[in-house]
Image (cartoon, rainbow, N blue to C red):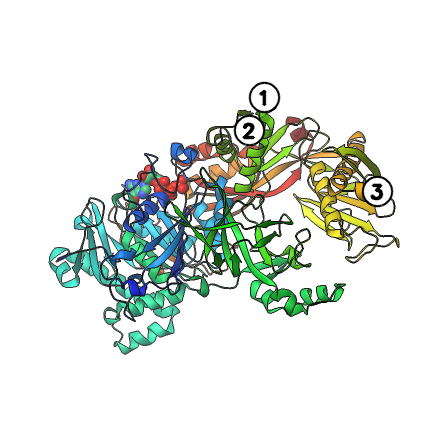
Amino acid sequence: MSLVAPPGTSTHAGPGGYASDLLSLVMEANWEQLSHAPGIRRRTIPATMNPGKTTTTERMLYYSGHTRRIGDVDEGSTVTDFLPAERSRGITIQSAAVTFHWPPLGEVSDVKTGVPQSHIPHTINLIDTPGHADFTFEVLRSLRILDGAVCILDGVAGVEAQTEKVWAQANRYSIPRIVFVNKLDRDGAAFERTVKEVGTRLRGWPAICQIPWWEGGKGKFMGVGDAINLCALKWEGGDGKRIQTYDMEELKQYDAGLRDELIQARLALVEILCEFDEVLLSTWLEHNDDALKVPPQAIRDSLRRCILDGSGRLIPVFAGASFRNIGVQPLLDAVDNFLPNPKERPDPEISLNGQEYKLSELLRGDLPVITAAHKRMVKKSHSPKELVAQIEGCALAFKVANHPKRGVLVYIRVYSGSIKRNASLWNTNLHVSEQAQRLLQMQASDALEISHIPAGQIGVIAGLKHARTGDTLVSYHGHNSKTGPPAPLNTLQLRPIEIPPPVFFAAIEPDSLSEEKNVKEILQLMLREDPSLHVNIDEESGQMLLSGMGELHLEIARDRLVNDFKAKATMGNIEISYRECVLSPTAAHRVLFDRDIAGKKAKAACEASVGPIDEVSPTESHTVERDGNRITILVIGSLGENSSEGDSSLPTDLPLPTIQAALVNGAVAALARGPRRNFPLHASHVTLKFESTTDLFGSDTSPAALSSASRLAVGAALNEAFDGGNIGLMEPVMNVVISCNEGSLGTIVHDISSARGGHVLSLENDGNEDASSDLPSIDPQRIYAPPDPFASGGGMDKAGPGQQRQVTARVPLKEMVGYLKHLRSLTGGRGTFVMSVDRFERLSGPREKAV
Ligand SMILES: Nc1nc2c(ncn2[C@@H]2O[C@H](COP(=O)(O)OP(=O)(O)OP(=O)(O)O)[C@@H](O)[C@H]2O)c(=O)[nH]1
């Protein structure tokens, strides 16, 4: 028996091993991801509500030397949950990014080849993400930039509906993952059951790397058995830095039961790896089919190979109880050992003009869309390849945060080239240029000024005025600051993500007229931080409506507005955001706008008509989709035909893309407020016609004048529809997935279909027939897991008698308000559900009256 420092702190490679290209690791709420190349890792923690992501993050920061004390979620003293609203509620709202090193930099000795990755310091950028379903979008957004993730599961609750949802998205982004089963100190903790649920509900084969160690097999949770290194680790209390290791010989004396189980775990681990990895299969054969003789390093290498593709078909599983400071250091080692570095990650997805490609395809310069664009160019000073070679860097803004001292910080991940200080960045979402005046690397509470952020790295741009979370920023050699890089490069989007439509709203009332401007500015900043919030300001009345994904989402937004940003305003009741729709096509309405804007003469005209989206087929002209509506812009040139980019009838300071963007903006503003009940329009198709011979008025025609003309013309068309009784109402209908036990299935199905007007779409067992997963279902009998000492029956009975069942249904949102409480009462507190917007549906007579 020996007293050793925790794995990952004593035997690491020396300062020489700290490669200069050390990356960092990212950890998100629910997920921890680590990237690790010759030094970089990022990890995330995905999970369900409250499985302990923030608690685990606190320990990671403490053991890595990033903090001097362990913060507590319940006391509101953690590093990553720093917003007052997070601290008062004990939940994560915004994903927080922190950078630290594992193993700690000062504690390394010599670098040797062939040592585990965890012996070489890695920079880890960790993102701690939220768990509540209202913030799912925040999690999905963070997933796009992760190189790897740690999924933290609650060992009592197991795999929950929310875990499955985030897991499926991680599959889509091919993110390598490991699972940490937390809270094993709690009454009712069931490691075996949780592992089997990982297999059946997440559809990956669990590769158990650690098994829980309960005192005497049934007592206090005190450590883990390590199936890779064939030893047991016992935490000695306190801050968790003192860990005793027991080798297999010592275990014979100390806990023979654990030793026997550890042997089973090692056999199962090698067996499952051999099924996926031929290299390990050969090693096993070389060791006379003896799984106990396979060297730990061969197992580590194999695990790394098996999860690298991010398919989730094999899932390494670790065990612990973060709150008791048990299991966190080996988890950090696992992040170093198994999660990939940015260079090992697949090519990111991009979109150009709405078409999907891979980034490397674009950078090679041979995409047909680029060659075609080159052919259309008037000035062909570059070949298509050279056109693309002018891209100096391209990055994704994954987080915008308002720092009390440093102002607005935009966190970016660079995907190609590098972003240099003072580079002019074209924002392909907003179509504006802004300069990256200051680049920072955030280290602990310090910010280091840097000259550039290279590909694969995460950094911060300070002082940007426009960039929002989710925007793509392109640095393009010699781009025009008004129109950006040549089309279609000006539309380049990295890993685009669809923002779900908001389904709840509330009115924001500034306390006084003088406060209005301040409130609007704060709301704009909040929107930059969180693009799943929407603000709609009525031009005429000045009324502000804030909409979002759920009631909690809006409550938190109110807390941020009033308490954090100190706005003097109140928020009205939270209500369901219905939609309005146009039932039949209107006539064309031409509007001439002729008024001063900000003291300057502004004049422009255009013609608009509106109809239902299905009945007006899209034309070949410029058509965009916005908030569930379609907008077509027809710009007629001097020759009476659709203008192309080089049309000489347009003034040079008002090129075609600027006109199109201004007209679209006006239409979007008009569609944001319907004529009937002020709800946004949905499923409507606007056609806007602009003739350069009649609708342009020299230098008086500015983008602002064009937007106003378009807003008024669309408004006039909508009013015509309203006067003719042609505006209908639509309601959000949710796709609801409920997890419950067999016993309560009948009551739930009855309640959904008769009392709530829902349609049940499917009933499944344990998610095994889940058609949304590409992976084959897994028979839980074939999954190895050590028996649960506290389980009352078989392995899968957490919800009481009977199997776990999953009900998928489509239900109007109105009927789902307050459903969690009801579901809990129907299922004895055990049922859970997730929902997302499925569609908006036209309301029938009686339902319409009820709105
Ligand atoms: N008993 C026990 N409690 C834990 C453990 N880990 C976390 N907790 C408690 O669980 C609660 C939730 O922990 P958090 O760390 O906030 O969980 P989270 O996953 O970050 O939560 P959200 O981000 O809001 O989803 C807190 O009260 C923690 O003290 C553990 O290992 N054992």
Q: Residue at x 72, y 29 (%)?
A: 676
The type of residue carrying mark 3 is: Phe
Q: Position of residue 259 (x, y in %)?
A: 18, 59
Q: Position of residue 416 (x, y in %)?
A: 53, 62
Q: What residue is pinned by disc 2?
A: 574
Real-space Cα distance between discs 2 and 1?
Answer: 21 Å
Real-space Cα distance between discs 3 and 2?
Answer: 45 Å
Mark nearer the N terminus (1 vs 3):
1
Question: In the image shown, does 246 or 35 lie closer to the viewer?
Answer: 35
Would residue 585 be found to the left or right of residue 283 on screen?
right
Q: Nearer the viewer, mark 3 or mark 2?
A: 3
Rendered position, 537 above or below 662: above
- CB under 8 Å between discs 3 and 2: no
Local secondary structure at mark 2: loop
Mark nearer the N terminus (2 vs 1):
1
Would residue 425 be found to the left or right of residue 273 on screen?
right
Quarter residue 205 falls in: bottom left
Local secondary structure at mark 1: loop
Tell me the quarter of the image containing the C terminus: top right
The local crowd at label 1, few if under 14, some if 14 to 19, many if 20 or more residues have their Cα within 10 Å, is few
The local crowd at label 2, few if under 14, some if 14 to 19, many if 20 or more residues have their Cα within 10 Å, is some
Disc number for residue 512: 1
The type of residue carrying mark 2 is: Ile
Tell me the quarter of the image containing the N terminus: bottom left
Quarter residue 104 falls in: bottom left
The local crowd at label 3, few if under 14, some if 14 to 19, many if 20 or more residues have their Cα within 10 Å, is some
- CB under 8 Å between discs 2 and 1: no
The type of residue carrying mark 1 is: Ser
Disc number for residue 697: 3
- CB under 8 Å between discs 1 and 3: no
